[in-house]
Amino acid sequence: MKLWQLSAAQASQAMAQGTLTSAQYTGACLERIAEHEPLVRAWAHVDPELAMAQARRCDLELRRSAIHGIPIGFKDVIRTRDLPTRHNSPIYANHQPNEDASCVATLRALGAVILGKTETLEFACGGNFPPTRNPHDLGRTPGGSSSGSGAAVADGMVPLTLGTQTGGSTIRPASFCGVFGMKPTLGRIATEGMKSYSVHLDTIGLFGRSVADLRLLANAYRMTEKPDASPPPVRRLRIGLCRTRLWDQAEPDGQAALEAAATLLRAAGATLSELTQSAQFEDINRYQDEIMQDGGRSAFLPEYYASNALLHEDFKAKVHNHLGLTPEMMRKALDTVALCRIEFEQAMDGLDAVLTLSAPGEAPPGLHTQGMATFNRLWTALQVPCISIPGMTGANGMPIGMQLVHRRYDDERLLDVAQTVATVIDTRERVWN
Amino acid sequence: MKLWQLSAAQASQAMAQGTLTSAQYTGACLERIAEHEPLVRAWAHVDPELAMAQARRCDLELRRSAIHGIPIGFKDVIRTRDLPTRHNSPIYANHQPNEDASCVATLRALGAVILGKTETLEFACGGNFPPTRNPHDLGRTPGGSSSGSGAAVADGMVPLTLGTQTGGSTIRPASFCGVFGMKPTLGRIATEGMKSYSVHLDTIGLFGRSVADLRLLANAYRMTEKPDASPPPVRRLRIGLCRTRLWDQAEPDGQAALEAAATLLRAAGATLSELTQSAQFEDINRYQDEIMQDGGRSAFLPEYYASNALLHEDFKAKVHNHLGLTPEMMRKALDTVALCRIEFEQAMDGLDAVLTLSAPGEAPPGLHTQGMATFNRLWTALQVPCISIPGMTGANGMPIGMQLVHRRYDDERLLDVAQTVATVIDTRERVWN
C-alpha cells in the first residue's frame, strides 16, 4: 500500500502513534499530484515547497489536534492567505488574499497542512467551467461546482478537501467521484471568507474517503459533542426511503441504485419505510433556484461595477434580476421552503435518517456539463445536513452516491448513521489507477 | 450653513450641478472630525490624506453615480483594503486586510470616498465597549454595536455610514443618536467581508441624515427599481401601530413618543390601526438570542483556536455553547420565527407600513451600556426591513426614534413610506453644536 492511499483517519492515527510523519504523508500526496494532475486537472494551485515546509513544521510541533499534519485542499472560492484565490474568474487572475477564510483559519490553527486550491466552476455558480476530469473516466465530468475537491480526493491526491454547496455543489461531485461528501446544517461552519452567493443556502462542504474522515473535520469545527463515533447497530436502524416528487427525473440506473441500496440495508436488518412529501414540495426546486438567483443580485455587485468587462454574462444576468423576481415571489419561495422544512422534520419522527439519491445517475460525459442538482436543491433549501455515501455503480460502472439526510443540527447523529450505512452499502474493494 | 452640514443627498445634488467639489465637502467633514473627534470618539481610524486624495481624484473623473464623491464611514467590522480593520479586538490590533468587503467595494466602484472606520463593540457583539459618546449628551451611550456609525452621522462628521445589525445594532444607535437608520431585508446587501456572527441575522445597516440619504445607498446597492422616490400622500397612508408584546418593557417616554407620533400622523390624515401579535410571538426575542448565540459557536472558532489568550471571555462562552443549545431548541427557535414571519406579513395586508418603537426610550447614561435591543431583536429575526426615523424626544430631550417596518423585500416601499412619515414626525430644526 502506498502512503497516499491512507485515508485521513488512518493517517491521523499513524501520526498519533508516531509511525508516520506529516512530511512523509504530504510528500506522498504531492508525488501523486505530480503524477496524475496532468490527467485529472483537479488543482488550481499547489505550492509543493510551501506544503512541505508546513508539514515539516508540523512534525516538529506537539500535536495540536487529530487533524494535525493532515494535508487538505480547498475549493478556490475559499480565501487562503498564502495561496492565490482566483474563483476561476479572470477578474481574480492575480489575486492573493492576505486573510484565511474562517474555515481555513480554523484548520490551520489546529495544525492542518494547507496543501492547495482545487478547481471550481466560476464563482461556484456559472460562467467558466473548470478543466477537471472524473478520475473514474477522464471523459466525464467530476460534477461541480466543487469539481477539483471531489476529483482530488477520489484520485488519492489528498485525503480531505473542502468545497461549498449552494445548489448541489458538494453532494453531486461526491456522488459522481465515488467519495464521501457532507453538506452540514446551514451555519454550522462559518462561511466567512468564501465567495458568497445566497445567505439562505451557502454551506461549506466536506470531502473524504470515509465517514471517519468526515468526522475528523466535523470534530475540528465542533459540530460533534462526542470525540468518537457511536454508530448504531444496523438492525436498529429505521430509515425513511425518500424517492422525492422528482423520481421521474432520476435516470434508470440511479433509480436502480437506490433500490439496490435499500435492499442491502433491509437484508442487513434495517427497517425501511417510505417517506413521501406532500404537494407543498412540488415546486421546491424552483423556489430554491429563486432564492439562489436572488442572492446573485447582490453577490456579484462589486464585480459588476468594478470589473464589468471581465464579468461573465451569467453573473450580469443575476445582477439584472433575470428571473424578474418580485417581493411577492421571494416571500412565497422562502415561506414555502420554511413550511416544507417543518413538514420534513416532523415526518422524520421515529426515523434515524432518510435515504435518497445524491444525483440522478452517473456522471454524464463531457466537461461542459456538471450534471444536474435535481436531488440536491431541495435539501439545500431545507438547510438540513446531508452525506453522500459511495458504493453503488451505474450502467457504465461509474459511481452513484446514496444520500443520507437528517434534521437540521443533527449532523452528529447523521455521521453516526452514515458510518453504519456505509459498512453495508460501500463494500467496494479500492482499486487505484 | 457650513459645508459639513449638507446631507449626502444635498451634497450629491450640488456636486452634480458643479457647485460643490468632493474635495470641498470631504475637507469640511475632516475639519469637523478634527474639531469634534476628541469629544465624540466616533472613529477607529481616519486617514485625512488618503481621504483627500480620493476626493481630488473623484473631482477629476466623470461622475460614476449619485454617490460619486460622497464621503462614507464604515463600521470597523467591515473590511477595507486601504484602512485597518480591527473589530475593536486586540487580536486584530495591527490588522490591514487587502480586500474590501462587498459593501465597500460596491461603493468604491461607484466613486464614493472611503473616509474612515467607525468605532464598534468588539466584533459587533460583546467584549470591549467602544469609547464613543452620544453627540447629544457626551455622558450617554450612542447605542451600539454600530456606535461610531450612529454618532459620526449625528455629529455632522460624515453624511453616511454603514453599520451592521444582528440584534439591534443599527436601528438602536440611529434612535439614540437622532439620525435615520435602515436595516434592509436579510440578504439584499451582501455581508461578504464583514465579521460574521449569524447567517440568519447578519445584515448591513445604513445611516444617514434623511430618507433621501438612505435612498442614495439603497440605489447604489440596487435595492430599488425606480431612481427617484415616490412617497405616497400622507392622507392615503394606512399604518399599523404595533406596540408588540413587549410594550411593558418600553420606558414611559418611549411609550409617550410612539403615541405622540401616532397622533401627529392621524392629525396629518393617515389612518392608523392596531396591529397585534399572537402568542406565537411571546418568546421571539429569546429565539432570536438562541439563533444569534448559536452563530457565535462557529463565528469565533478561528480566534478561539488561534488567539485564545486575546479572545474575550464573551466569545469563548459562545464557542462553548453557553446556552446549552440542542438541535431540538434550534429547530424550535428557527421554525417559530418562520411562522411568526408568515403571521406578521399576512397581518400587513392592506397596510403601507408598521409603526413601532426603535428602542425602549432615550439613550441611557454611561458608556458601559449600549441600551437594550428589545424592540429590534424580533424584527431582525423576521428578516424584515426597518427604518428608524428621528424627530421625537424623551424626558431629557434626547432623541427617540420611531421604527417603520415592512415585509421582506419591500425595502423600496418602506423607503417611500418613510419619506412621507418623516415629513410629519421629523419637524426638528437642526441645531448643531
Image (cartoon, coloured by chain):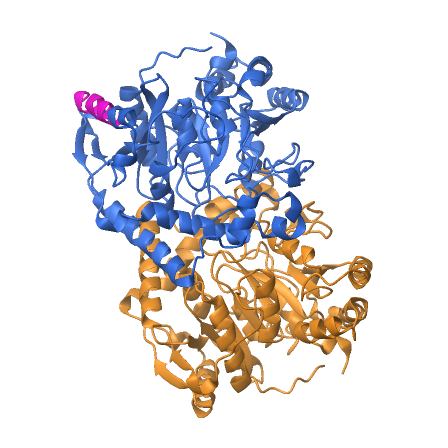
Chain colours: A orange, B blue
Q: Residue at x 73, y 51 (%)?
A: A82
Q: Is residue A273 above or below residue B414?
A: below
Residue B28, how many percent across, how many down?
Answer: 56, 13
Residue A186, how many percent across, how many down?
Answer: 47, 58
Residue B66 seen in this snapshot? no
Magenta-colored stretch includes residue B262? yes
The quadrant where residue A354 appears = bottom left
Q: Is residue B352 above or below residue A254?
A: above
Numbered range of the magenta stretch: B258-268
Q: Residue at x 64, y 46 (%)?
A: A91
The total number of labels drawn is 0
Q: Nearer the viewer, residue B206 or A92?
A: B206
The quadrant where residue B59 appears = top right
Q: Residue furthest bottom?
A: A267
State the predominant SS element of the stretch in magenta. helix
Residue B393, how many percent across, how many down?
Answer: 32, 19
Magenta-colored stretch includes residue A101? no
Image quadrant containing the N terminus of chain A: bottom right
Residue A279 seen in this snapshot? yes
Q: Is B360 on the left or on the right of A209, as rendered?
A: left
Q: Residue furthest top?
A: B1
Q: Nearer the viewer, residue B352 or B255?
A: B255
Image quadrant containing the C terminus of chain A: bottom right
Residue A277, how many percent across, how many down?
Answer: 31, 71
